[in-house]
Amino acid sequence: MATLHATAEPAQDPAYAIAMAQFNAVADRLDLEDGLRALLGASKRELTTHFPVKMDDGSIRVFTGYRIQHNLARGPAKGGIRYHPQVSLGEVRALAMWMTWKCAVVNIPYGGAKGGVACDPKNLSLGELERLTRRYATEISILIGPESDIPAPDVNTNARIMAWIMDTYSMNVGYSVPGVVTGKPVDLGGSQGREEATGRGVAIVAREAMRLLGKPLEGARVIIQGFGNVGSNAGRILNEMGATVIGVSDSSGGVYNPDGLKPSEMEEFRAAGGRFCDYPTHKCITNAQLLELPCDILIPAALENQITAKNAPHIRAPLIVEGANGPTTPEADAILAERGILVVPDILANAGGVTVSYFEWVQGLERYFWDFSEVTTKLERVMTQAFTEVAALSQREGVTLRDAALMLGVQRVAEAIRLRGVYP
Ligand code: GLU
């Protein structure tokens, strides 16, 4: 791998193109003032850092990382950090903007941010991963803090990485600051239920969407693209709610069984380092094939730009619930709407993670911790209320759930800016 990787122009990044097309359409619909449109169409702060990491073989490799704050009108910046070879300035910019709308849709008092490092964690030893994390955390320490910008896990990052970030930040200031990250291990001030929260939120909104369609969740056939933290927990919880998972995939390919798969077995297989393309007893299918199989609920829970104008005409699910951020392009959205396929958008569907991050932050500030059932009861309330609000707005305005969620989110942020006024 080249040490310094050249990133594409942000404007050409597919995620950024999706985020801006969505924002411009909703800004038109809301008739947003020119000043607000310009302000909300850009990030507030963007940090790019090229930093060295000592590798196990004694060499030094330079990595590129980002931390971007999109908007802080409603509160401190909030959003995850992802480690992936495709991380770029444009992608992180898009993801930060989506965090702003997402926090506003579930009405938690945060602005939006995102971070990322262009790297392939599969090719790093544990020691290299820790040194990369600690150096990146130090590089972005001019932005992050419990009152200013609070990172969390995202693609390929987890509680252990959050613990290293918390420790690094704390070492640099000289005292422990658990509130600087969420998604920490429970033993370090993390919240019960945070690990599964995004998946649980996806399952809750899938249940609500099925109710809206007048269909039973019991026996509903579910296909999940991506079996990381979000996909695997959504699959397990939907299974507990009575649905049947019939297809899953990871980056290597997918496994399909129309009679049902056991999410717990799939999780065990993955935890033991298995790749679905090698799954015994089942023929491997591609991710592209998986998305076009017949089912009742399709959950893209991997990366951006998966449902496009090319495959949208062939999707055979009446309901799509977006576990990933930005999996559907605006062109695909139009095709799906035309075909009567209901899409529960990312900024609503996967907001369970940041919602329990908020709970974790609140518990940390109070130094008073809740049990699992208190967390899930509160999560249920936030997710069902947000779903109800978005569904009502979509009906009232005659728009898709995505447009309604974006309208709600952008409107709330715009109102916060109007109330605060422009300084000086
Ligand atoms: N990375 C998650 C997301 O995209 C969670 C962010 C957070 O908890 O701050 O929503």
Image: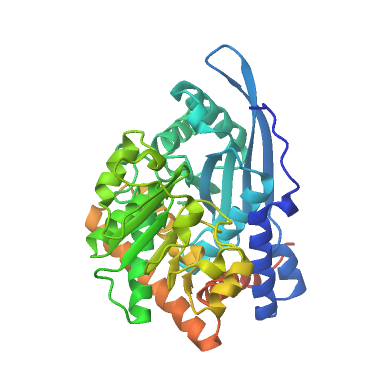
Residue visible at 31% across and 78% down?
A: 215
Relative height, residue 189 to residue 26 (above, below): above
Relative height, residue 249 to residue 83 (above, below): below
Quarter of the figure that contains the N terminus: top right
Residue visible at 56% across and 42% down?
A: 144
Residue visible at 48% across and 44% down?
A: 251
Pick the residue in front: 141 or 292: 292
Residue visible at 68% across and 66% down?
A: 21
Residue 164, how many percent across, how many down? Answer: 45, 31
Question: In the figure, is residue 200 to the left or right of 10?
Answer: left
Pick the residue in front: 129 or 337: 337
Residue 223, how many percent across, how many down? Answer: 38, 59
Residue 358, how many percent across, how many down? Answer: 42, 55
Picture quadrant of residue 266? top left
Tally the marks.
Answer: 0
Question: In the figure, is residue 117 to the left or right of 315?
Answer: right
Relative height, residue 160 to residue 113 (above, below): above
Residue 12, how many percent across, how many down? Answer: 73, 53
Quarter of the figure that contains the C terminus: bottom right
Pick the residue in front: 27 or 224: 224
Inspect this view and state whether residue 390 appears. yes
Pick the residue in front: 122 or 78: 122
Picture quadrant of residue 269? top left
